[in-house]
Image (spheres, rainbow, N blue to C red):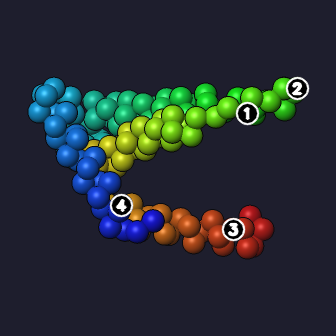
């Protein structure tokens, strides 16, 4: 992914979060969250779980995953599946923003972890 696109994703998400906070004042505590506070940890957990719920909604579109299923369903709505995955990512990007991370932080952590998992694969993790 081009980092400019990642920057734009973060910008769009922050813009939405600001608009949401204007419409529903107090929906988020002050950003960045202070993760030493119980209430801020609860917000963090709630946002993360919403992302997980959206990912489960995406998985509901997969009908042929059961190994014991004898019949296959060939219809699949790519657009609906992708929309649910995007919904999940929106919550996960919100989580990063709420905790004070930006696109550069995310990109650096991603590249670092990518090197680790490639090394694990190469060295028989």
Residue 120 horizontal side relative to residue 44, left or right = right
Q: CA distance from mark 4 to mark 1?
A: 33 Å
Q: CA distance from mark 1 to mark 2?
A: 13 Å
Q: Nearer the viewer, residue 45 or 9?
A: 9
Residue 53 is situated, as x and y percent measured from the top left of the image, at 49, 29
Q: CA distance from mark 3 to mark 4?
A: 26 Å
**Could you classify mark 1 by the number of other residues whose Cα lies within 10 Å: few (under 14), some (14-19), or many (20 or more)?**
few
Q: Mark number for residue 50?
A: none
Q: Which residue is mark 2?
A: 70
Residue 65 horizontal side relative to residue 41, left or right = right
N-terminal-most mark, 3 or 4: 4
Residue 102 is situated, as x and y percent measured from the top left of the image, at 29, 58
N-terminal-most mark, 4 or 2: 4
**Could you classify mark 4 by the number of other residues whose Cα lies within 10 Å: few (under 14), some (14-19), or many (20 or more)?**
some
Task: Please identify the quadrant where the N terminus is shown.
Answer: bottom left
Q: Nearer the viewer, mark 3 or mark 4?
A: 4
N-terminal-most mark, 2 or 3: 2
**Residue 88 visible in rendering:** no
**Could you classify mark 3 by the number of other residues whose Cα lies within 10 Å: few (under 14), some (14-19), or many (20 or more)?**
few
SS at badge 2: loop
Q: Nearer the viewer, residue 117 or 78?
A: 78
Q: CA distance from mark 4 to mark 2?
A: 42 Å
Q: Mark number for residue 6?
A: 4
Q: Nearer the viewer, mark 2 or mark 3?
A: 2
Q: Quadrant of residue 49?
A: top left
Residue 45 is situated, as x and y percent measured from the top left of the image, at 40, 33
Q: CA distance from mark 3 to mark 1?
A: 36 Å
Q: Which residue is mark 1?
A: 74
């Amino acid at each position: 992914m081009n980092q400019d696109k990642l920057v734009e994703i973060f910008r769009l998400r922050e813009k939405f979060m600001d608009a949401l906070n204007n419409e529903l004042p107090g929906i988020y505590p002050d950003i960045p969250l202070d993760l030493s506070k119980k209430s801020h940890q609860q917000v963090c957990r709630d946002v993360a779980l919403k992302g997980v719920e959206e990912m489960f909604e995406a998985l509901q579109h997969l009908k042929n995953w059961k190994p014991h299923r004898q019949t296959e369903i060939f219809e699949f709505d790519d657009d609906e599946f992708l929309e649910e995955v995007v919904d999940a990512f929106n919550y996960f990007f919100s989580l990063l923003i709420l905790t004070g991370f930006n696109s550069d932080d995310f990109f650096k952590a991603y590249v670092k972890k990518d090197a680790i998992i490639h090394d694990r694969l190469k060295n028989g993790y």
